[in-house]
Amino acid sequence: MRATILERQGEPLTATTLPDPEPGPGQLLLDIKACGVCRTDLHLRDHEIDATKLPVVLGHQIVATTEDGRRVGVPWLGWTDGTCHYCQTHRENLCVSAKFTGRDIDGGFAELTVADERYCLPLPDTLSDEDAAPLLCGGLIGYRALRFTGEATRLGLYGFGSAAHMICQVAVYQGREVYAFTRARDERTQTFAKTLGARWAGGSDELPPDQLDAAIIFASAGELVPQALRALAPGGAVVCAGIHMTDIPSFPYDILWGERSIRSVANLTRRDGEEFLALAPKVPVRTTVTTYPLENAEQALADLRAGRFEGSAVIVP
Ligand SMILES: [Zn+2]
Ligand SMILES: [Zn+2]
């Protein structure tokens, strides 16, 4: 099969051919139709987080068909032990032996893959393969982060990329007011956010016109944490949704005082996936997608790093 692999962290992906994968017990052989590009793929490529196997096929937002013709989605959570303390308390996202797609298990920047059937998710029929792929990480981990904001009405989204462009639509559907924060002077993305229902859009160095009840940080810049705290009303929460963030600068206690809180979101549970994929067609979530052929996966990562597209990038083998 054709695949684009990460051989060494910090170096470009390589287009190559690999032996076709063979499914083990409980695994499905999958014919990949589309695979979304996530900032986590870029963190692995750039060595901001450690790889656990090399070479590895990146990509954990896989839309594929099974040998018997069903369409399934393969997300980041690829396997759990089912027996640890976290698995036994409905927190399989924190499983001590979890295996993640596109890091511990070869992922979707390829023509074929194998996946444990128990972790494959049903996909709504209403979306094409390309349009459905971004739901599988940005969408459903974004949705987990949104749940952690509770009943927040005024919601800030810091970093308006793949996840935020979907979660903005869900939040507006739920009756919340969205405040979109982009890189300073990125008027193109601010306009994009407003077309998706954001009430206000500005630079992440600005304070919004109203105090926020909660903020989700999708960008990986640690300095956004104190900036978001400064925008919060008392009792508000900052939720950090990414797997990697640069160091958070120190900040005065008084911007946390008033029962403000900071927490992170790690991974997903299968239940998050099922809930979000059932909700998405009701909103309905519409994705803005730029597609790349498999051999151009390195270009997709470069464009993500530079912020050259709105919404999500998707690899089509
Ligand atoms: Zn991801
Ligand atoms: Zn476990």
Image (spheres, rainbow, N blue to C red):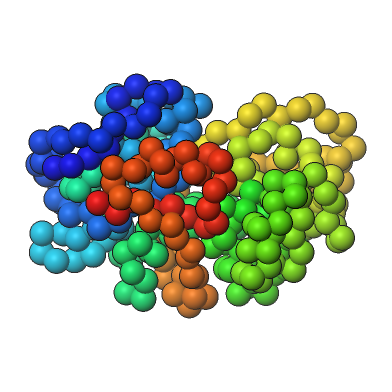
Residue 90 in view (yes/no): no
Determine the residue positioned at 86% across, 40% down: 255
Residue 200 in view (yes/no): yes
State the quadrant of the N terminus: top left
The spot of residue 78 in percent (x, y) is 31, 44
Give whichever of 99, 40 is nearer the camera.
Answer: 40
Determine the residue positioned at 79% across, 26% down: 250
Determine the residue positioned at 78% across, 38% down: 226
Is 180 positioned to the left or the right of 231 in the image?
Answer: left
**Residue 191 figure quarter:** bottom right
Up/down of 187 relative to 199, above or below: above
Determine the residue positioned at 42% across, 30% down: 45
Up/down of 12 relative to 180, above or below: above
Q: Residue furthest right?
A: 254
The spot of residue 169 in percent (x, y) is 58, 68
The spot of residue 14 in percent (x, y) is 29, 31
